[in-house]
Every structure is written in C-alpha cells, then in structure tokens.
Amino acid sequence: MSFPTLRLRRLRATPTLRALVRETTLSPAQFIYPLFVVHGENVRREIPSMPGVFQQSIDQLARETDELAALGIPAVVLFGIPAHKDPVGVENFDPNGIVQQAARAIKQANPDILVITDVCLCEYTDHGHCGIIRDAEILNDETLDILGRVAVSHAAAGADVVAPSGMLDGMVGAIRAALDSAGHSGISILSYAVKYASGFYGPFRDAAQSAPAFGDRRTHQMDPANVREALREAQLDVDEGADMLMVKPALPYLDVIRRVHERFDLPLAAYNVSGEYSMIKAAAERGWLDERRTVLETLTGIRRAGADMILTYHAKDAARWLAEID
Ligand code: PBG
C-alpha cells in the first residue's frame, strides 16, 4: 500500500490519537534530580551558569525532597562541596562529611526518596582531579582504596545506590568488594560506565567547584569519537558487578545510549548534563527557544534512544509540565 491510499497523517489528526500511538513514554518516575550540597545554614545559592539550580545547605533538603516527592520524582543524586579541600580529599569518607550528612537528613525527612551518591575525588581534592596524584599523574590503583572507603561511608550514612563517576579502571570491582566486606551487600552500584571527556560539564564544575587545577580528564574519561570502546567500558563494569549503567553526557551520545541499551540488559541511565541544561536555559531566556517544548523533546529523545532513567536538572520543571499535559 502506498499514497494516496496510505496516509500516515491520519494517526496524527487529534491529541487523543497521537497519545494512543505514542511509542515513547516520559514520566517523572524516570527522573533523578541532582542536588549540590554545601556546609552552612540557610544557604540556597543559585549557580550563575545554571539558572534554577542551587547549592543548598542540609536544612533545605527536607523542603526540597518534599517537593520532589509531590512531583513524583523518586530519586536524587548528591554532589557535595566540602569545607576544605586537600590532596586526598579526606572529607569524602568522613562520617560527618557533607554528603553523609545530606544522606542522613534526606532519609530522615523522606525515607522513600532514593539517595544516590556520586563517588569521585574531584570535588574534594585541592587539585580537582578524580584520583590521587603523583608527578602530575593520577594513581589509578592507589585511588581505588579511597573510592571503596567513600562508598562504604555513603552506604553507612543511608545511601541506597553509589555512583562512581571517575572512570578509573577497576573502580566498580573495588567498590563492590569494599561494600560487601563492610556488610553493605544490599547497596547497588550505578556505574558511570561510559563517560566522555566533554565540554558540556563546564557549568557543573562551577556548581561543584571541581575544575581540575592543571591538565584535563582525557586520560580517564573517554574520547568523544569512540563508540566500540564504550561497549568495552560497559562490559568491564558489568563484569565487575555494576547493577546499572550510565552514559554521559546524553545529547551528543544518543547513538551510544542506543548501542549500550541493545547490548546490555542492565537498567540504563543517561545523564543530561549541566551544559545541555544551560544551553536550553540560555536560549529560552533570550526568547530563542520555547523552554517547555525543547526540554520535553530533549528528554523524550533520550528515552527514545534507550535510556530507562534520566539524571536531569530539568526534572522538576518537566514533572510539572507533564502533569499539565496529562
Ligand atoms: C565528577 C562528575 C562530573 C559530573 C558529574 N560527576 C564532572 C566532571 O567529570 O568533570 C558532571 C555533571 C554535569 O555536568 O552535569 N564527579
């Protein structure tokens, strides 16, 4: 059958028909909202390059998670800004570190909110790198012990899921072993398995104050040109015991999301990163883009590519808009 008998426009005629034949669903239940947590009281400081996103102190988290729960957003991912930075980043595994305090506070206020913690060194080290450094080189294997300690301290504070983001070799296996030997065999690992060395992290590095003091992250994060290597990265993490995988960033890597989705049966997350957020916000502020349409289109595209869940700064706005549409 072909035109004029076949007319594909028929199924686009009304909102009801369009909804009935829609192939991809988008729901707040698939969103994970990133939170930047800082020391102090009554802090709610907007990040200049990320309008609508705030660094917040612990006392703000009950209200924040109440709002998420009301919007149907089930999970947060925590990023901490420590009081002091040093070469190792000791606050990272301090039982009273900022992320540990935040995890406890959220679990107390809203026990049903899933707490995912970012496990990496870069926010805590004075040099801003994702591992300990000697002669300007990251010491991969020596850093693994620290990542294990960080994950265990997050679990002890109430985290449900730990998310290692440093792209060091062996990080998932080391964290699994550390969690299991500390009695946290029920805590799952969401691995940033496929994380590219991306220019789209720029605003995040302001938000988390984590820009590297020298050099860059190209010796551990992936080359944007590679996709077969992404499958090897994901395989390595699966073999080391990852429970869920992540591809990051999302928009320039939709093909990577699709390939990882097709190859692996693990739940797959995509990180719609800071720069992707800020691009839309900046264009919308100038009136160049319709924010609501472009955000929902973006998130739908990420889902269509194969992501089961999306880490996104748009989560709260998108949840509100989805409630209006439904
Ligand atoms: C590393 C980490 C980064 C992001 C999440 N975890 C930054 C980096 O690798 O430099 C970026 C997230 C974003 O841009 O929204 N701890």
Image (cartoon, helix red, strand yellow):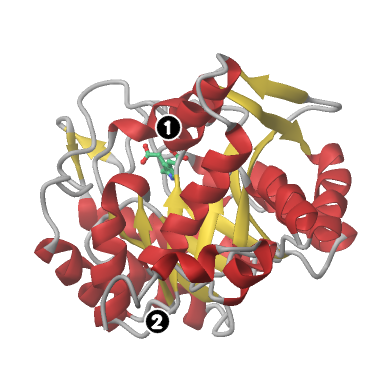
Which residue, given by chain and number where applicable, does mark 1 sit on?
275
Where is the N terminus found, in terms of image quarters? bottom left
The correct choice, above or below, for 275 with respect to 69 in the image is above
* Residue 200 pos. (x, y %): 35, 33
* Residue 171 pos. (x, y %): 32, 64
Asked if the residue at label 1 sits under 8 Å from ligand 1, the reply is: yes
Which residue, given by chain and number where applicable, does mark 2 sit on?
266
| Contact between labelled residues 1 and 2, with CB atoms less than 8 Å apart | no
Question: In the picture, residue 130 is in which quadrant?
Answer: top left
Q: Total number of numbered labels?
A: 2
- The residue type indicated by label 1 comes to Gly
Q: Residue at x 53, y 64 (%)?
A: 12
Instruction: Determine whether, in the image, residue 269 is placed left or right of residue 292.
Output: left
Sooner in the amino-acid sequence: mark 2 or mark 1: 2
- The residue type indicated by label 2 comes to Leu
**Residue 187 visible (yes or no):** yes
